[in-house]
Image (tube, rainbow, N blue to C red):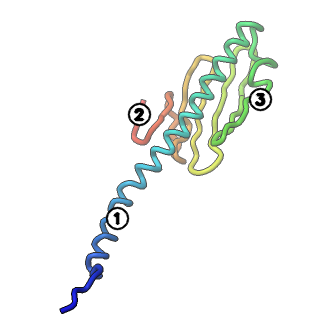
């Protein structure tokens, strides 16, 4: 009597089904984890740029024509940065992601932090949403 070696088709299908179920559960969590890391890049750059604008204001008593907004804020790997509403007493810095679903964050001279868009959905909250399901 010879002994057969190997797996039956049912055993292989069960393993494939288990891997499929684990992937279905794990992949969205992985994507959210990656997004959170990218969002931290934007918020840290916005906070740093706001501090540099405030330091410039302390030296020059104006935001207009000086500081990071005048020289341009360097884009990072995942976000581009732009300044708007730059006057002697006000400014707004906006971070917009370069690819994928839209993430748009803002900060101004009063340190008002806004999430304009999170994963392509307009939010408009006066805080930075850093992960899925978070609110102010």
Q: Residues within 10 Å of mark 1 (few under 14, many from 20)?
A: few
Whole-angstrom CA distance, mark 2 to mark 3, is 31 Å
Q: Residue at x 69, y 22 (%)?
A: 91
Q: Residue 121 at x, y = what percent? A: 51, 46
Pick the front one: 29 or 64: 29
Q: Are marks 2 and 3 in contact (CB under 8 Å)?
A: no
Pick the front one: 46 or 125: 46
Q: Quadrant of the C terminus?
A: top left
Pick the front one: 70 or 36: 36
Q: Secondary structure at mark 2?
A: loop
Q: Earlier in the sequence, mark 2 or mark 1?
A: 1
Q: Residue at x 75, y 7 (%)?
A: 59
Q: Which mark is residue 72?
A: 3
Q: Residue at x 79, y 24 (%)?
A: 70
Judge depth for marks 2 and 1 and give the one in front.
1
Q: Residue 89 at x, y = what percent? A: 71, 14
Q: Residue 64 at x, y = what percent? A: 78, 18
Find residue 116 and report its image quarter. Answer: top right
Q: Residue at x 71, y 29 (%)?
A: 83
Whole-angstrom CA distance, mark 3 to mark 1, is 48 Å
Q: Secondary structure at mark 3?
A: loop
Identify the residue position indicated by label 2 in the image: 135
What is the total number of numbered labels drawn onto the structure image? 3
Q: Quadrant of the N terminus?
A: bottom left
Q: Residues within 10 Å of mark 3 (few under 14, many from 20)?
A: few
Find residue 7 and report its image quarter. Answer: bottom left
Identify the residue position indicated by label 1 in the image: 19
Residue occupying the far front of the picture: 1
Whole-angstrom CA distance, mark 2 to mark 1, is 33 Å
């Amino acid at each position: 009597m010879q002994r057969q070696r190997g797996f039956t088709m049912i055993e292989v299908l069960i393993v494939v089904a288990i891997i499929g179920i684990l992937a279905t559960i794990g992949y969205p969590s992985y994507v959210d984890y990656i997004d959170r890391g990218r969002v931290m890049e934007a918020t840290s750059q916005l906070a740093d740029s706001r501090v540099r604008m405030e330091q410039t204001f302390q030296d020059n008593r104006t935001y207009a024509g000086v500081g990071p907004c005048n020289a341009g804020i360097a884009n990072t790997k995942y976000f581009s940065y732009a300044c708007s509403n730059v006057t002697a007493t006000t400014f707004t810095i906006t971070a917009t992601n370069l690819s994928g679903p839209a993430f748009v964050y803002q900060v101004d001279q009063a340190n008002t932090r806004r999430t304009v868009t999170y994963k392509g959905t307009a939010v408009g909250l006066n805080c930075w949403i850093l992960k899925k399901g978070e609110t102010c």
